Amino acid sequence: MSDCLFCKIAAGQIPADKIFEDDCALVFRDISPQAPTHLLAIPKKHYPSVHEIPPDEVGTLLGKLMTAVTTALRKTDLDKNGYRLVVNSGEIAGQTVPHLHIHVLGGRSLAWPPG
């Protein structure tokens, strides 16, 4: 999608502080962090939200995306100290970029409930 911020980052048109990248996924630092460590994990292919992934691609895509998240957790030591994964869908849930992404938050105590 030509006007999508995350598609431009995935294509290398906009720089990002990358933590992990493979052919399917990219994990990079959020430019407006809400925790000491705030990463974003995105699929390189554009999907506005989880429910818009074609049923025959869900398992593979989410499996590859979670593999990218796991690798990033280890690289940033969040796997040792705790973290939260958040997926927002739609404006009312706080999604500001209409491209599926997982927020990876850590480095401090996180309150519950989050909303």
Image (cartoon, rainbow, N blue to C red):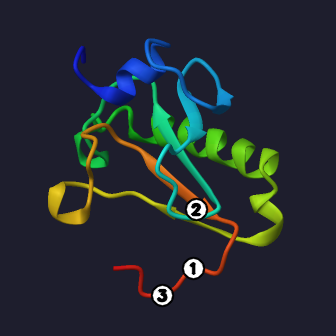
Which residue does the image show at 17% across and 56% down from the upper left? 91
Label 2–label 3 contact, CB within 8 A: no
Q: Residues within 10 Å of mark 1 (few under 14, many from 20)?
A: few
Which residue does the image show at 51% across and 45% down from the upper left? 30
Q: Which residue is mark 3?
A: 112
Q: Which residue is mark 1?
A: 110
Which residue does the image show at 36% across and 22% down from the upper left? 7
The type of residue carrying mark 1 is Leu
Looking at the image, residue 102 lies above or below residue 94: above
Label 3–label 1 contact, CB within 8 A: yes
Q: Quadrant of the N terminus?
A: top left
Q: Give the image location of residue 21, x and y in percent.
A: 64, 25
Which residue does the image show at 23% across and 40% down from the upper left? 52
Q: Residues within 10 Å of mark 2 (few under 14, many from 20)?
A: many
How far separated are the C-alphas under marks 3 and 1? 7 Å
Q: Secondary structure at mark 2?
A: strand
Label 1–label 2 contact, CB within 8 A: yes
Asked where in the image residue 100 lies, by quadrant, the reply is top left
Q: Quadrant of the C terminus?
A: bottom left
Q: Give the image location of residue 103, x and y in percent.
A: 49, 54
Tell me the tag on residue 105. Answer: 2
